[in-house]
Image: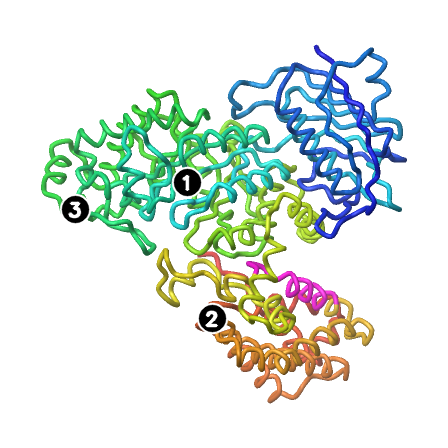
């Protein structure tokens, strides 16, 4: 074992924390939550006397990780005159004197692998911090935790004393980015990898081909990217750069080449592979298209063998994703030759034909040394058990695949592009509480993949859709299954969101500039007040309001608005607390203050909207916010009176809220309506609620708003 040491000439910077620096984190702000944490007394300072020693087989990832750590420590207020390279110590005594000791036992694998030991132990005393792991991967994750622990107090930086024994719950903690529907350049990919590493995600699932674009260079079949990409693709040198960049951060890179459907961009350059006659053009809209590869043509498999062999050499990871989803079969059913092939080979339906294609594809991929991954549709009795199933259908489908002996990971519940709440992603679990899956089958559940499909994101907006919600998914896949406190998750997520900004992610910093573009040189604050309280419509509702194309600008208020309104979530918590503890005037003060400010905001915003055409569609929601806030204030007045509001008022208030909740052309939702509806319901039936006592009020109203579903 080799021991290395660096003495850091550390100087406290002139200003302790800069405006863009990550916020100081408290002891309980760790994300993901480690497996075991025992807090101790005291703290170790990170100051001018700081030294760092390492002991373990040489691994450039550890050196690179420490250099990144230095940059983040400087952002906290610890400055270094020079990031000196790690060098051998003069004696073993130096390790005992070091502020931070990094020890690992085994050299890292040449290619990072699924199941590689990622555990670590971090022991911090007032004298020294020692980070120990079996592999460099454990050191990487332990350093992330160490950096999260670093705090600024009184102008000094320190780490609290603690013993952490940590290991991931699942070995597959992925994030998929679709770079095909909307092009995402390499700078987006790299800053995303930085964010992934911060929260211990370890698989970058790179969705490279779609109907709308073929995004990787093929030197063997150049017409694929030359004609199928509009000139927007990753060169092979860029791919190598991303793979190396990811490896430095403990992340594997798995490419996806979706087939036999979602292949229109393939067919632009190679129409001879299609099931229907061409010519073909790159798709400019979204959906499930008829275009598909022809599973009966040998030239299809010849090209795939050559192309996938080329890609297998480019991507060192052991896994290759073949997609396999959403083939509607129309081009197969309308082709007499394909129908004859199906009859001759006793293929009863499109599912059988696709399984025949996948079997051939499996042989190609495995011959090139890769393991096949596909979406749910790849499941078929004719396919080997060593394929990996990625389930968009849900935990039950994933469990069924596991019972059949297939490895798999969960994507359902982690579609970040659907603009669902952070809590909904956080509580989705590859192994849900109460699962009766046998232990042998549980071993087949590898983890999960957060997914960012790119129909409605651009490089300007993708960060706001990914972060910080992806960090909640990362915690679900790393931390123990018992870590499920949503309120505590939100508290820690706020700190992590600030940390993520240090990597160049713009999910926070890009918000106000987008709003400013909408109002020009006018004051942005009134629009910001409204934008803080609206959310984009959920699931795929945007595509139902208007037609979108790949060249449609995504620069409206709905694109600037965050997927989840933190202001509305906090207001909802305040309302819940108020209803649980009774209509006390002191408790109502904050509610009244917020509602009054929102009620009056339209008067300031309307003249701005009059001269800002791009923001004018916000007017309907601004007016609705005034009406909804007024009803909330009236409800508080009735609750303070101690008697139910008049029946007529209750009906009018409910109607106002219903109108405000109706879909609009802006594709936005006013996120405070559910909380105000609770106040209105409570005010309308206070006489009936009073005998029950306040603790029961909120629960009863929740039941009225969300009655239990009848089991079918």
Q: Residues within 10 Å of mark 3 (few under 14, many from 20)?
A: some
| Magenta region, residue range | 562-577
Nearer to the camera, 496 or 537? 496
Q: In the rendered structure, are the residues bearing label 2 and label 3 in contact, judged by CB atoms less than 8 Å apart?
A: no
Asked if 86 appears above or below 451 in the picture, the reply is: above
Q: Earlier in the sequence, mark 3 or mark 1?
A: 1
Per the image, label 1 sits on a secondary structure element best described as strand
Label 3, label 1: how far apart the Cα atoms are: 25 Å
Placement of the C terminus among the 4 image quadrants:
bottom left
Q: Nearer the viewer, mark 2 or mark 3?
A: 3
Q: Earlier in the sequence, mark 1 or mark 2?
A: 1
Label 1, label 2: how far apart the Cα atoms are: 30 Å
Label 2, label 3: how far apart the Cα atoms are: 38 Å
Nearer to the camera, 628 or 289? 289
Per the image, label 3 sits on a secondary structure element best described as loop
* Residue denoted by label 1: 207
In the picture provided, is 119 more to the left or to the right than 94? left
Asked if 222 appears above or below 575 in the picture, the reply is: above
Residue at position x 18%, y 29% from top? 298
* Residue denoted by label 3: 278
Placement of the N terminus among the 4 image quadrants:
top right
Residue at position x 76%, y 28% from top? 122
Where is residue 88 drawn, in percent x and y? Answer: 75, 14
Query: Is residue 564 covered in magenta?
Result: yes
Residue 666: mark:
2
Asked if 522 appears above or below 263 in the picture, the reply is: below
């Amino acid at each position: 074992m080799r021991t290395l040491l660096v003495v850091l000439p550390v100087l406290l910077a002139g200003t302790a924390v800069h405006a863009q620096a990550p916020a100081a984190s408290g002891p309980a702000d760790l994300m993901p939550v480690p497996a075991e944490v025992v807090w101790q007394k005291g703290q170790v300072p990170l100051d001018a006397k700081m030294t760092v020693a390492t002991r373990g087989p040489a691994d450039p990832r550890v050196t690179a990780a420490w250099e990144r750590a230095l940059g983040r420590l400087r952002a906290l207020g610890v400055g270094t005159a020079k990031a000196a390279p790690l060098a051998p110590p003069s004696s073993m005594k130096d390790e005992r004197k070091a502020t931070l000791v990094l020890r690992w036992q085994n050299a890292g694998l040449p290619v990072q692998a699924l199941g590689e030991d990622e555990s670590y132990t971090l022991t911090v005393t007032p004298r020294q911090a020692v980070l120990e792991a079996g592999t460099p991967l454990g050191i990487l994750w332990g350093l992330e935790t160490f950096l999260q622990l670093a705090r600024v107090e009184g102008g000094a930086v320190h780490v609290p004393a603690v013993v952490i024994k940590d290991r991931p719950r699942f070995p597959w903690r992925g994030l998929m980015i679709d770079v095909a529907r909307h092009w995402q350049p390499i700078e987006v990919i790299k800053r995303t990898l930085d964010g992934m590493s911060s929260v211990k995600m370890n698989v970058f699932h790179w969705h490279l081909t779609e109907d709308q674009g073929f995004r990787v260079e093929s030197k063997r079949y150049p017409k694929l990217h030359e004609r199928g990409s509009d000139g927007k693709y990753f060169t092979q040198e860029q791919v190598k750069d991303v793979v190396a960049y990811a490896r430095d951060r403990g992340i594997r890179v798995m490419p996806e080449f979706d087939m036999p459907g979602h292949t229109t961009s393939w067919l632009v350059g190679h129409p001879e592979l299609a099931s229907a006659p061409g010519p073909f053009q790159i798709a400019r809209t979204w959906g499930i298209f008829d275009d598909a590869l022809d599973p009966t043509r040998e030239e299809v498999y010849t090209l795939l063998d050559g192309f996938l062999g080329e890609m297998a050499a480019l991507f060192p990871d052991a896994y290759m994703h073949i997609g396999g989803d959403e083939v509607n079969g129309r081009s197969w059913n309308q082709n007499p030759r394909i129908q004859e092939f199906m009859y001759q080979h006793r293929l009863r339906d499109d599912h059988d034909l696709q399984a025949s294609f996948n079997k051939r594809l499996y042989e190609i991929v495995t011959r090139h040394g890769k393991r096949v991954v596909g979406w749910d549709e790849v499941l078929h009795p004719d396919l080997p058990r060593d394929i990996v199933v990625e389930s968009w259908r849900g935990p039950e489908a994933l469990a069924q695949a596991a019972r059949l002996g297939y490895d798999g990971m969960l994507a359902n519940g982690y579609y970040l592009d659907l603009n669902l709440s952070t809590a909904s992603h956080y509580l989705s679990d590859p192994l849900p509480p109460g699962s009766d899956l046998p232990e042998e089958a549980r071993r087949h559940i590898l983890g999960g993949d957060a997914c960012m499909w790119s129909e409605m994101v651009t490089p300007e907006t993708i960060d706001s859709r990914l972060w910080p919600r992806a960090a909640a998914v990362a915690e679900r896949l790393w931390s123990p299954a018992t870590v499920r406190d949503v309120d505590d998750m939100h508290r820690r997520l706020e700190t992590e969101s600030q940390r993520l900004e240090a990597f160049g992610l713009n999910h926070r910093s890009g918000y106000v500039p987008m709003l400013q573009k909408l109002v020009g040189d006018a004051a942005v604050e009134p629009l910001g007040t409204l934008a803080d309280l609206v959310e984009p419509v959920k699931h795929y509702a945007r595509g139902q309001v208007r037609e979108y194309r790949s060249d449609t600008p995504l620069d409206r208020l709905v694109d600037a608005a965050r997927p989840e309104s933190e202001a509305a979530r906090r207001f909802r918590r305040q309302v819940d607390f108020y209803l649980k503890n009774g209509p006390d005037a002191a408790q109502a003060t904050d509610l009244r203050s917020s509602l009054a400010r929102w009620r009056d905001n339209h008067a300031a915003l309307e003249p701005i909207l009059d001269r800002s055409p791009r923001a004018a569609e916000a007017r309907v929601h601004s007016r609705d916010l005034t009406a909804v806030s007024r009803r909330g204030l009236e409800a508080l007045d009735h609750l303070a009176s101690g008697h139910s509001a008049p029946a007529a008022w209750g009906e009018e208030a409910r109607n106002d809220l219903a109108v405000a909740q109706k879909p609009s052309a802006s594709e936005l939702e006013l996120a405070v309506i559910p909380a105000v509806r609770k106040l209105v319901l409570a005010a309308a039936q206070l006489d009936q609620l009073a005998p029950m006592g306040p603790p029961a009020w909120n629960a009863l109203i929740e039941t009225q708003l969300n009655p239990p579903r009848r089991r079918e």
